[in-house]
Amino acid sequence: MGAYAYEELNIDNFEEKIKGKNVIVDFYAPWCPPCKIVAENLENFSTSKPKNVHVYKVNVDDELNLAKKYGVSALPTLIYFKNGKVVKDYVGVLDSAELLQASKENFK
């Protein structure tokens, strides 16, 4: 594993961090093996991601209210937000090429 260093969000800073931006939020749990694959893929994606795309993480074990608010019922779930609004969600593992393609489609 590399130095996966995306900022963790919580109920207190979530709305502030996602407003007015193109954001991908990785809803994950530390015990979830596919979540670790997504974490690595997001790290690889960071080298090719558009500059106007921000990536954050939410640990569903710590932030169950956020997971419920956005209907996260399976892990891993990536939710794409544009200007604070949900654009699309993806359940399961996306590789870095799929992450880039989804960013281009969702953040036109």
Image (cartoon, grey):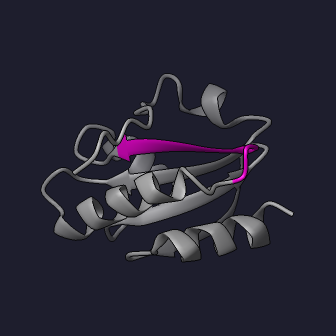
Q: Quadrant of residue 94?
A: bottom left
Q: Quadrant of residue 88?
A: bottom right
Which residue is depicted at the point 33% across and 39% down? 63
Residue 52, position as x, y percentages in the image? 76, 44
Residue range highlighted in magenta: 50-58
Q: Is residue 72 visible?
A: no
Residue 11, position as x, y percentages in the image? 45, 30
Q: Is residue 34 above or below residue 85?
A: below
The answer to if 55 sits in the magenta stretch is yes
Q: Is residue 102 above or below residue 27?
A: below
Which residue is depicted at the point 69% across and 64% down? 103
Which residue is depicted at the point 35% across and 68% down? 73
Is residue 106 found left or right of 88 in the rendered image?
Answer: right
Q: Quadrant of residue 64?
A: top left
Residue 41, position as x, y percentages in the image? 40, 63
Q: Is residue 52 above or below residue 34?
A: above
The answer to if 96 sits in the magenta stretch is no
